[in-house]
Image (cartoon, rainbow, N blue to C red):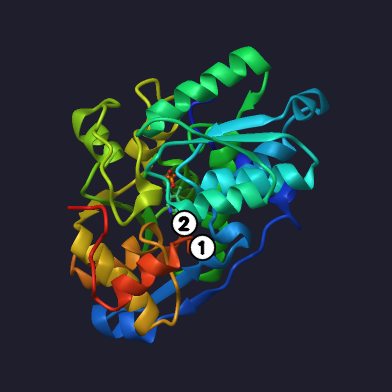
């Protein structure tokens, strides 16, 4: 049978499989954002997850689901940084080989962390698609097992455990804001939330610069979008023209998609730091940014996911001091 959707059952099984390997992160009320919106705003502090992003949930579930023979071969993935770091961490715990292929757009701090965890790093080309070609070569020539960053049932089910936690922590949520790139996160979270609380809306948030899923949803099928430098570097990359799961799940489960400018994302990072006292990377801050930009209306409590904190600290300092919107973005 070809799996077309990752269901609540898969997500609950993932939660059991990764128990003890990932943190259950807290959700806290934000007074400043609640005042801003005129409704309760809760922040899910997933940037405090081990490895600094939610990606450890999917990576841990995918690795725990491998056979002994697959574990012996080792894993390979293309990554904008956080998936690679999560996979390197999960593979290390199992004593497995991990090879992470990245483009030159991946920030240096993310690369160093992956090396520190003992994974092999290959830098190839200027896009996620270039990095993926190296992955395909390693699968064919060295027999490594590919664990892609989003379009894989075990990855989606792992990310979905975040949705279960959010709706348990805020059962009366009217709206949940999640980051949207390849859509593994949004598919998993929306699947969990819609199953437990069908009336809760789930909205995806992306940067306007190179929003591949949004362009694909508008076109009605996966399309190629030029990958551009952005403050939300973890949201870069395409969804794959041969996308199997996340395009259809996002199309069926998301209530809307919101796009943000680089200035709006910078304002989100600044607010997180100055008002919430949290260090958040660009991708992690897009939910806060959408609220601040006045792009959200709601009739009840909102849960905003802070998805990662792996930002270069020099870049962060410049953003919070208002010195630069983005060093690379025009
Ligand atoms: C990967 C990532 C996302 C986007 O997840 P997708 O499953 O690709 O949509 C959002 N935020 C952070 C911090 C990430 O690392």
Q: Secondary structure at mark 1?
A: helix
At a point 40% along the width and 33% down the height, the residue shown is 128
CB of mark 1 near ligand 1 (< 8 Å)? no
Observer-nearest of 43 and 195: 43
Contact (Cβ within 8 Å) of mark 2 with mark 1 = yes
Mark 2 or 1, closer to the camera:
1
Observer-nearest of 187 and 96: 96
Which of the two discs, 2 and 1, labels the residue nearer the N terminus?
Answer: 1
Q: Secondary structure at mark 2?
A: loop
Q: State left or right for residue 299 relative to residue 7.
A: left
Q: Is residue 272 above or below residue 162?
A: below
Dot 2 surroundings within 10 Å: few (below 14), some, or many (20 or more)? some
In x, y percent, where is residue 150? 49, 37
At a point 38% along the width and 53% down the height, the residue shown is 179
Kindly identify which residue carries mark 1.
Answer: 167
Tell me if I can see residue 200 in this picture. Answer: no
Q: State left or right for residue 28 relative to residue 57.
A: left
Q: Which image quarter: residue 212?
A: top left
Q: State left or right for residue 198 relative to residue 167.
A: left
In x, y percent, where is residue 291? 26, 69
Kindly identify which residue carries mark 2.
Answer: 197
CB of mark 2 near ligand 1 (< 8 Å)? no
């Amino acid at each position: 049978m070809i799996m077309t959707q990752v269901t609540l059952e898969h997500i609950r099984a993932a939660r059991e499989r990764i128990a003890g390997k990932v943190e259950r992160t807290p959700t806290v009320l934000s007074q400043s954002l609640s005042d801003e919106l005129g409704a309760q705003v809760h922040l899910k502090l997933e940037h405090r997850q081990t490895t600094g992003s939610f990606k450890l949930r999917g990576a841990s579930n995918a690795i725990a689901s491998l056979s002994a023979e697959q574990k012996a071969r080792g894993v390979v993935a293309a990554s904008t940084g956080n998936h690679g770091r999560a996979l390197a961490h999960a593979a290390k715990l199992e004593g497995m080989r991990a090879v992470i292929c990245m483009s030159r757009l991946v920030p240096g701090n993310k690369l160093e962390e992956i090396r520190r965890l003992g994974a092999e790093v290959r830098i190839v080309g200027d896009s996620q698609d270039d990095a993926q070609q190296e992955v395909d070569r390693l699968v064919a020539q060295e027999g490594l097992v590919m664990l892609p960053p989003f379009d894989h049932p075990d990855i989606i089910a792992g990310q979905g455990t975040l949705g279960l936690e959010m709706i348990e922590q805020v059962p009366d949520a009217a709206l949940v804001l999640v980051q949207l790139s390849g859509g593994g996160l949004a598919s998993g979270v929306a699947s969990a939330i819609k199953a437990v609380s069908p009336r809760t809306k789930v909205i995806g948030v992306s940067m306007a610069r190179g929003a591949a899923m949004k362009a694909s949803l508008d076109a009605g099928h996966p399309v190629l979008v030029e990958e551009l430098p952005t403050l939300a570097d973890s949201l870069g990359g395409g969804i794959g023209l041969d996308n199997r799961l996340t395009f259809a799940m996002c199309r069926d489960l998301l209530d809307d998609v919101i796009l943000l400018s680089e200035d709006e994302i910078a304002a989100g990072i600044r607010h997180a730091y100055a008002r919430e006292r949290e260090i958040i990377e660009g991708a992690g801050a897009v939910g806060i940014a959408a609220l601040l930009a006045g792009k959200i209306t709601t009739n009840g409590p909102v849960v905003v996911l802070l998805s990662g904190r792996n930002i270069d600290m020099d870049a962060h300092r410049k953003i919070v001091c208002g010195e630069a919107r983005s060093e690379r973005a025009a």
